[in-house]
């Protein structure tokens, strides 16, 4: 289980594979100077509910992974996440779609 840390104090645990895909979408948006909201549901152990942060070029973001290997990337998942990031409601984690073909999978070198 990895961790997303915003501005050094707002934190949430996200599975490493999902966190990798979120990181790719977030960094692509920030490279294009496109700020956005990122929303996640809080675990019941911390009170439940949801948190939304405004992500922009000067945000302090940390993606901390528990594993050492980079997972293969599912292009369909990247596209689904990017779709939410470009919507008025902002980025949120959607379930990983089944890959349509081997062409949709990209191995990222470690």
Image (cartoon, rainbow, N blue to C red):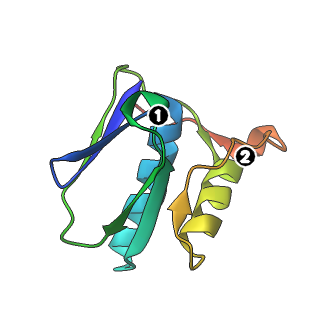
Secondary structure of the residue carrying numbered label 2: helix
Is 41 left or right of 30, judged from the image as shown? right
The x, y position of residue 65, in whole percent, is 33, 29
Q: Judge whether 2 appears above or below 95 on screen.
A: above
Q: Judge whether 105 appears above or below 57 on screen.
A: above
Quarter occupied by the C terminus: top left
- Residue reaching furthest to the front: 47
Residue at (37% x, 33% y) in the render: 46
What residue is pinned by disc 1?
43
Is 101 left or right of 59, judged from the image as shown? right
**Residue 26 lies in what quarter of the image?**
bottom left
Q: Say whether disc 1 or disc 2 marks the residue closer to the N-terminus.
A: 1
The x, y position of residue 101, in whole percent, is 83, 41
- Residue reaching furthest to the left: 8
How many residues crowd around disc 1 within 10 Å: few (fewer than 14), some, or many (20 or more)?
Answer: few
**Residue 102 lies in what quarter of the image?**
top right
How many residues crowd around disc 2 within 10 Å: few (fewer than 14), some, or many (20 or more)?
Answer: few
Quarter occupied by the N terminus: top left
Secondary structure of the residue carrying numbered label 1: loop
Residue at (56% x, 73% y) in the render: 89
| Distance from the alpha carbon under mark 1 to that under mark 2 | 31 Å
Q: Are marks 1 and 2 in contact (CB under 8 Å)?
A: no
- The residue nearer to you, when weighing 30 against 45, is 45
Any part of residue 15 in sight: no
Q: Judge whether 108 appears above or below 78 on screen.
A: above
What residue is pinned by disc 2?
104
Q: Which mark is residue 24?
A: none
The x, y position of residue 9, in whole percent, is 17, 47
């Amino acid at each position: 289980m990895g961790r997303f840390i915003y501005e050094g104090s707002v934190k949430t645990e996200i599975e490493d594979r999902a966190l990798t895909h979120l990181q790719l979408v977030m960094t692509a948006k920030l490279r294009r100077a496109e700020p956005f909201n990122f929303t996640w549901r809080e675990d019941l152990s911390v009170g439940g509910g949801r948190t939304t942060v405004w992500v922009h070029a000067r945000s302090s973001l940390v993606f901390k992974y528990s594993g050492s290997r980079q997972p293969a990337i599912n292009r369909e998942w990247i596209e689904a996440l990017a779709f939410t990031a470009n919507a008025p409601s902002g980025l949120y984690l959607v379930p990983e779609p089944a890959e349509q073909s081997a062409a949709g999978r990209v191995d990222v070198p470690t």
